[in-house]
Amino acid sequence: MSLSGHIAFITGASQGIGRTCALRLAKEGAAVAVAARNQEKLNELVNEITAGGGKAAAFPLDVADEEQIKTTIKAATDQLGKIDILVNNAGITRDQLVMRMKRPDWDAVLQTNLTSAYLCIQQVIPNMLRLRWGRIINISSVFGQMGQAGQANYAASKAGLIGLTKAIAREVASRNITCNAIAPGFIETAMTDVLSEEFKQSAVQQIPLGRVGKPEDVAGAVAFLASDDASYVTGHVLSVNGGMLM
């Protein structure tokens, strides 16, 4: 699955799934532009990639800020020459039962998880159209497919990513650009570390493979969808959930 010659832009890359995706795409030969709010963690990631012989550059970015998205993607394109792989991974949670959910918590989750993906896609599409090659990969969630009590905002944002994925796939397919989504299940990340042990054990009981997933499980799927091996796959939602939802 060689990605040599390609440039990937990854949001939410400072930790968890985004960080692991950056490492995997760099391993496959892509140069990676890693973006997130935490500059220190991004620098550590870039150092790790370059120490292994890869190419990477860090770009501090808050995806909730439209102007930052525009200027950051332009800066990454100017520095690296192009962006032909986009991984929309940035995401947050603000959990609460819907009857108690505050409007700012709804807006923040939709802005970060869904609107930012639309804005990033909008910025990279012109270059991909000129190249007549592109890979757009949106990180959704199993909860965007099945819902989750206390996560109406998160589930809505992740379900929205699936609809966005299919619409974009239809818009750009004629130019050899694919757009797919990955819907991870329960994955070991900082976002899930804060959950109680009781909740984690309960979750594992719902997973036929009998284990929590690792960020590497998602990164492998991202590498596949970014590669020429997946050139005939578009508008697809790849479930990486251990059988949690069939």
Image (spheres, rainbow, N blue to C red):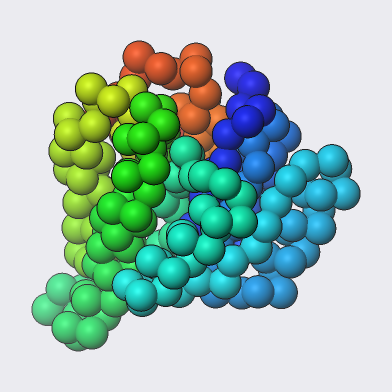
**Depicted 7 relative to depicted 199: above or below:** above
Task: Report the label total.
Answer: 0
Residue 211 visible: no
Q: Which residue is depicted at the point 41% across and 51% down?
A: 88
Q: Could you tell me residue 191's position as x and y percent?
A: 51, 64
Q: Could you tell me residue 229's position as x and y percent?
A: 49, 15
Q: Which residue is depicted at the point 26% across and 48% down?
A: 161
Give left or right: position of 47 versus 197. right
Q: Could you tell me residue 16's position as x and y percent?
A: 59, 56
Return the residue nearer the eye: 134 or 127.
Answer: 127
Which quadrant of the structure image shows residue 35?
bottom right
Return the residue nearer the eye: 219 or 46.
Answer: 46
Q: Could you tell me residue 241's position as x and y percent?
A: 43, 36
Q: Which residue is depicted at the point 35% across and 14% down?
A: 232
Quadrant location of the C terminus in the rendered image: top left
Give left or right: position of 3 versus 52. left
Return the residue nearer the eye: 113 or 188.
Answer: 113
Quadrant location of the N terminus in the rendered image: top right
